[in-house]
Amino acid sequence: MNILIAEYTVSHDPTLAPEGRAMLDVLTNSFTKIGYAVYCPEERKDFSEEIARLGKICDEGIVIAPDHLLARFTKNLEDVTRNIGCNSFSIAVCANKRRTGQILQSHGIDVPKEVSSGKRIVKQISGCGAVGVRLTDGPAGDGEFGQEYIDGDHFSMSLVGGRVVGEVCLYYTGEGPLLLALNKQDIRFNSDGTVVYLGGKTPVDHPRKQEMYDCARKALEVLGCQGYVGIDMVVTPDRIVVVDVNPRPTTSIIGIAACMEEEIAQVLLDASYGKSPASVHLSGQASYTSEGQVTYDRS
């Protein structure tokens, strides 16, 4: 069996390439362990053309790319092979951070309020992670918008959603998404207000973990996401706020894979065929950086 893992940043975005390389290596190693031959786009070649070329010889595929590019490249993949990640339509919705917030809010999910003045978080409407995000009272630029600043603890919840669209009659089970892990994010604010993502640790526990899962599950299902999805949250004593939905593998996957008994490749494949396990088994704790380094603690 052949699989295409199309990771964009390794050869097209030097700023994000270390994170991309770490995710690519984890998935490549995992799929190789379960007997797959892994194909990746060649560097310095047109990414869309490489997806079209390699997808034709692969049985399945998955794309990892910045949010504003992910839907287009995923549609390229869907045209030539079977996608085991999120569908391109839901990705396109999630790429618009403003629209995503409006949809989630309309379904009773707490999201940051949009504000246009005062000290606030300013981010790109179609941004990727913490890139360009800042705490400021200055004006938002073209393609940006402002949200209230919430002083709380930063977490992400890594889920794997089952098949929602595409082959729905064959593989849709109606079961909720699989919880891989709750992750604590290391988010810092520079003196100029810019937000920096440094990595995190996984798995972690929290007294409100079930509430956080319920919130993340609802967000995933409202947006129709499937495959690996990372839900970013800020948690305060009285709020669980969804600040971002990432319909793709995120950096936390490198820490989770270090702790998980199951192969992440098998989990993703099984979910795409409606065969998600009821749970996964994690032992120890891993700390990971945005540069892709992982430190595993067995204790």
Image: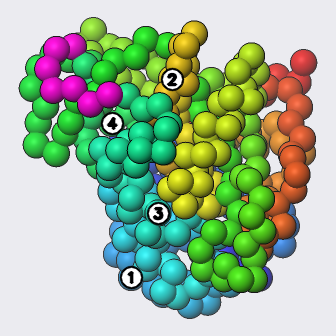
Q: In the rendered image, which residue does mark 4 sit on?
A: 131
Image mark count:
4
Which amino acid, by three-letter code, is at mark 1?
A: Glu
Dot 2 or dot 3: first in sequence order is 3
Q: Are marks 4 and 2 in contact (CB under 8 Å)?
A: no
Q: CA distance from mark 2 to mark 1?
A: 39 Å
* Mark 4 residue element: loop
* Mark 3 residue element: helix
66 to 18, vertically: above or below: below
Q: CA distance from mark 2 to mark 3?
A: 23 Å
Q: CA distance from mark 3 to mark 4?
A: 22 Å
Compare residues 218 and 184 and report the one nearer the observer: 218
* Mark 1 residue element: helix
Q: Nearer the viewer, mark 4 or mark 2?
A: 2
Q: Nearer the viewer, mark 3 or mark 4?
A: 3
Q: In the rendered image, which residue does mark 3 sit on?
A: 90
Residue 128 lies in quadrant? top left
Dot 3 or dot 1: first in sequence order is 1
Q: In the rendered image, which residue does mark 1 sit on?
A: 49
Dot 3 or dot 4: first in sequence order is 3
Q: Residue at x 10, y 43 (%)?
A: 142
Q: Nearer the viewer, mark 2 or mark 1?
A: 2
Which numbered dot is residue 234? 2
Q: Which region is colored magenta?
A: 113-119
Dot 4 or dot 2: first in sequence order is 4
Q: Nearer the viewer, mark 3 or mark 1?
A: 3
Residue 198 visible to an observer of this rendering: no
How packed mark 4 is, by other alpha carbons closer than 10 Å (few <14, some 14-19, many 20 or more), is some
Q: Are marks 1 and 4 in contact (CB under 8 Å)?
A: no
Q: Residue at x 86, y 36 (%)?
A: 282
